[in-house]
Image (cartoon, rainbow, N blue to C red):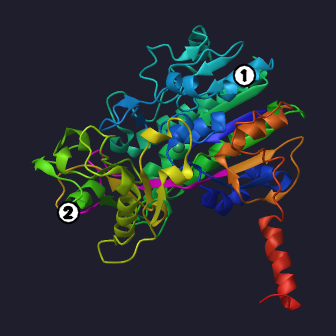
């Protein structure tokens, strides 16, 4: 089996450009495809980790790039493969046990590169530098250099955030970087005869963050640009062509899955959520900073603070007595405070007083597992994630757009895209109800292996999908015509 992860690939854009994406179209016509539910929140590290292990983030304990392992304030630890591998079993541990040869290329949260028996790993964009050991086995590093040249870890360089770089230069770098991933995928299929190759391409996430304003006429900062208006579409086509080349390399016994961990969609604004908590009396500062500073550098009066927020889409923690070091909320008020905050948060409007379609999720209702207890107490999606938050302290109002890290055209959306094609995959067209948790069981099922009882997803090849989306509409229409329903 081959899994090509296209980070942030947006299903709506795939549907819109379908005619120009001949490989994806083939998978969609001859296999199954649809939207696939991301994790809450739809952030890269835990989304791909759920793909690897088939379990919700509560089992490995992170919801972002950092995590906490106790009830201290803040989330100082960077997520890494060693922590996850201690807590959950990944496909790259299960498959070698069944004698399968595995290659894992650039899958987020594979630094340090795990030791895969009889297998290979090239670690992800969170690798500090190519000076470090970023491959397993170590000698693979030299092979990679021969095949693709100097390995590019991410769009950003060691001294520059990609959001601040010259757009053309960073786009060229993204193409080169993604080409390396596709070339390595081919190498592991062709030369190393792997049974399972799982590659994640990051350019599909980086490009829209840079170019979305030129693509979407409804974007807040929509700008007509002769050259950049097709930047995203061309990159989608580039990925599609490379996947086509991979398809030509695999034999008739091999299935292929395309999957994205979330979408990347237009970003309309940001709520400065900690500033809002201050205004509403849930957070108190000992001293207001003179400039914008990160939450954890702010001088917070924890004895007078009931909640704080972090993350991109909005993750809220309560300051609970007996749990956090300077807790202020009685544990028996946990739910009532969360309900009170939820109602108030849902009432936050945009700058012009227009209602936002805001959803909130209590962690204990959507996540389980041993490490769930250290997670955020409430997750927030402002306007279907078209609004993000800023956790910085020192704003004058609760609204902002740019961050100090530079402008960003896009944010993450809660559904990715998937298409599955190959032997054992029935031609079912578009299906609903797919979840990232289903990917690991699907891979195991297609490879003829047992699915561990404690995996939470279901094999998409076994799942009952009922009618396809298109068929459903057609049958409904027909029944309506003869008066069965309105
Ligand atoms: Zn991602």
Q: Say whether residue 245 is visible.
A: no
Q: Say whether residue 365 is visible.
A: yes
Residue drawn at the location 42% of the way across and 54% of the way down? 378
Q: Where is residue 289 in the image (x, y as percent from the top left)?
A: 12, 47
Label 1: which secondary element: strand
- Sequence-first tag of 1 and 2: 1
Q: Does residue 446 appear to the left or right of 232 in the view shown?
A: right
Residue of label 1: 102
Q: Does residue 268 appear to the left or right of 414 in the view shown?
A: left
Residue drawn at the location 52% of the way across and 28% of the way down? 124
Label 2: which secondary element: helix
Q: Position of residue 415 (x, y in %)?
A: 59, 55
Q: How many marks?
A: 2
Numbered range of the magenta stretch = 398-417
Q: Position of residue 132 (x, y in %)?
A: 45, 14
- Closest to the observer: 12 or 40? 40
Q: Position of residue 435 (x, y in %)?
A: 67, 50
- Of all residues, the one furthest to the front in this rendering is 332
In the image, residue 472 above or below residue 110 = below
Q: Give the distance between the C-alpha atoms of the residues marked 1 and 2, in whole angstroms.
A: 52 Å
Placement of the N terminus among the 4 image quadrants: top right
In the image, residue 315 above or below residue 147 = below
Residue 409 within the magenta-colored segment of the rendering: yes
Residue drawn at the location 36% of the way across and 72% of the way down? 347
Residue of label 2: 279
In the image, residue 185 above or below residue 21 = above
Q: Does residue 344 appear to the left or right of 241 in the view shown?
A: left
Placement of the C terminus among the 4 image quadrants: bottom right
């Amino acid at each position: 089996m081959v899994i090509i992860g296209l980070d942030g690939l947006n299903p709506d854009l795939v549907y819109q450009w379908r005619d120009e994406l001949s490989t994806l179209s083939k998978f969609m016509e001859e296999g199954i495809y649809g939207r696939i539910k991301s994790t809450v929140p739809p952030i890269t590290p835990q989304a791909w980790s759920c793909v690897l292990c088939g379990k919700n983030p509560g089992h490995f304990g992170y919801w972002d790039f950092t995590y906490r392992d106790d009830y201290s304030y803040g989330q100082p630890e960077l997520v890494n493969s060693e922590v996850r591998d201690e807590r959950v079993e990944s496909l790259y541990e299960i498959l070698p046990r069944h004698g399968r040869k595995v290659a894992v290329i650039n899958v987020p949260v594979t630094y340090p590169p795990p030791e895969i028996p009889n297998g290979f790993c090239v670690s992800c964009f969170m690798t500090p530098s190519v000076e470090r050991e970023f491959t397993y086995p170590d000698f693979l590093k030299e092979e990679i250099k021969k095949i693709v040249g100097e390995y590019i870890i991410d769009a950003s360089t060691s001294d520059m955030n990609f959001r601040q770089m010259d757009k053309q230069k960073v786009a060229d770098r993204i193409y080169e970087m993604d080409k390396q991933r596709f070339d390595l995928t081919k190498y592991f299929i062709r030369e190393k005869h792997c049974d399972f190759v799982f590659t994640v391409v990051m350019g599909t996430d980086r490009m829209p963050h840079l170019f979305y304003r030129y693509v979407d006429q409804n974007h807040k900062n929509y700008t007509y640009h002769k050259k950049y208006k097709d930047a995203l579409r061309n990159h989608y086509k580039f990925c599609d062509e490379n996947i086509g080349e991979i398809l030509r390399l695999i034999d008739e016994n091999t299935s292929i899955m395309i999957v994205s961990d979330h979408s990347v969609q237009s970003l309309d604004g940001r709520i400065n959520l900690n500033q809002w908590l201050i205004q509403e009396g849930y957070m108190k500062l000992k001293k207001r900073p003179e400039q914008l500073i990160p939450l954890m550098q702010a001088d917070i009066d924890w004895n007078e603070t009931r909640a704080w927020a972090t993350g991109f889409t909005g993750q809220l923690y309560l300051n609970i007595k007996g749990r956090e070091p300077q807790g202020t909320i009685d544990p028996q008020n946990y739910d009532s405070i969360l309900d009170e905050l939820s109602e108030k948060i849902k009432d936050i409007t945009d700058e012009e007083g227009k209602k936002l379609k805001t959803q909130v999720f209590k962690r204990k209702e959507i996540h389980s597992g041993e490490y769930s207890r250290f997670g955020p107490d409430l997750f927030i999606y402002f306007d279907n994630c078209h609004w993000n938050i800023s956790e910085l302290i020192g704003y004058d109002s609760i609204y902002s757009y740019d961050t100090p890290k530079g402008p960003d055209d896009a944010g993450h959306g809660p559904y990715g895209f998937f298409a599955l094609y190959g032997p054992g995959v029935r031609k079912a067209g578009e299906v609903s109800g797919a979840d990232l948790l289903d990917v690991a069981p699907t891979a195991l099922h297609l490879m003829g292996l047992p699915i561990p009882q404690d995996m939470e997803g279901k094999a998409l090849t076994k799942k009952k999908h009922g009618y396809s989306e298109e068929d459903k509409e057609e049958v409904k229409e027909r029944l309506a015509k003869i008066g069965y329903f309105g």
